[in-house]
């Protein structure tokens, strides 16, 4: 009877709504980072980053109010849509693996720009931590997650029309521009360039990486190719 009771308790614990919600929470390890779900205590750090000179992200304006709304939305979208069984947004904090410091944010977001491309990826990184490839490492691992978890064939990304460094890096990663769109931002409607990436192209690019980007690549890269690359400006949404 003891064994049956234990199995009974484990079953109903796993069926508990709170336990079911936790089953959808995400933590990702990359070669240098941990991508984790946002927590209420991240508000102060997100607010701090949003006040940095040179910072730009469509839904943050440097006020604490917007940082609070940002984390509230991150918590809200941790629960899958009951109609689809998928999350609307996957909003993750970018943290340093060795210190746990929050240095930015990355997101896999449900969008409806073009048929057949249901998700886009975006991110921001503290300007003080840019030019080290952290943002690229985060967004590529989230892209890998999207392709593997949802069996997507394509994924999209957007950038400002005047952000040439971002567009150059996006195209280098195999994205193709398909449209000019208008995005709702904290400052009102703004123009964006829409790019799309094929799954096959993404993995072809990963086979060419000079240093580990996905955790599975660690240990498979020759020592003389492990130096940092992609030292240009981080792409901004």
Image (spheres, rainbow, N blue to C red):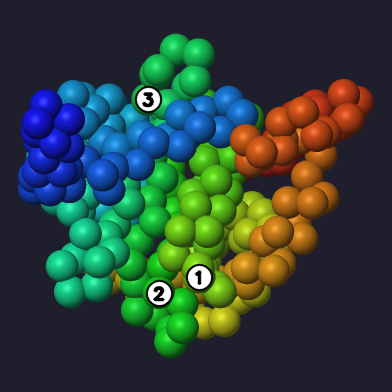
Q: Quadrant of residue 187?
A: bottom left
What residue is shown with label 2? 118
Which residue is at the front of the view, 19 or 135?
A: 19
Residue found at x 79% / y 51%: 207
Side of 141 where 63 appears, left or right: left
How far from the left and from the top, in percent, is residue 177?
A: 60, 76
The label nearer to you, 2 versus 3, is 2
Q: Secondary structure at mark 3?
A: strand
Side of 158 where 164 appears, left or right: right
What residue is shown with label 1? 152
Q: Which mark is residue 102?
A: 3
Q: Earlier in the sequence, mark 3 or mark 1?
A: 3
How far from the left and from the top, in percent, is residue 53?
A: 40, 32
Q: Quadrant of the N terminus?
A: top left
Q: Earlier in the sequence, mark 2 or mark 3?
A: 3
Mark 1–mark 2 distance (CA, rounded to whole Å): 8 Å
């Amino acid at each position: 009877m003891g064994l049956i009771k234990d199995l009974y308790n484990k079953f109903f614990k796993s069926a508990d709504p709170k336990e079911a919600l936790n089953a959808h929470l995400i933590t990702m390890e990359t070669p240098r980072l941990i991508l984790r779900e946002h927590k209420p205590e991240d508000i102060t750090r997100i607010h701090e980053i949003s006040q940095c000179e040179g910072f730009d992200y469509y839904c943050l304006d440097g006020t604490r109010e917007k940082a609070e709304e940002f984390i509230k939305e991150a918590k809200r979208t941790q629960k899958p849509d009951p109609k689809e069984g998928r999350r609307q947004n996957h909003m993750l904090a970018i943290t340093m693996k060795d210190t746990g410091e929050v240095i930015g944010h990355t997101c896999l977001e449900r969008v409806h720009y073009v048929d057949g491309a249901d998700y886009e990826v975006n991110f921001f990184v503290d300007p003080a931590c840019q030019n080290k490839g952290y943002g690229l490492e985060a967004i590529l691992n989230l892209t890998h997650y999207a392709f593997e978890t949802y069996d997507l064939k394509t994924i999209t990304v957007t950038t400002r029309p005047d952000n040439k460094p971002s567009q150059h890096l996006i195209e280098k990663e195999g994205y193709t521009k398909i449209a000019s769109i208008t995005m709702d931002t904290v400052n009102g409607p703004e123009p964006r360039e829409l790019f799309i990436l094929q799954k096959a192209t993404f993995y072809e690019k990963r086979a060419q990486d000079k240093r580990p980007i996905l955790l599975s690549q660690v240990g498979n890269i020759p020592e003389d190719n492990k130096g940092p690359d992609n030292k240009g400006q981080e792409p901004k949404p």
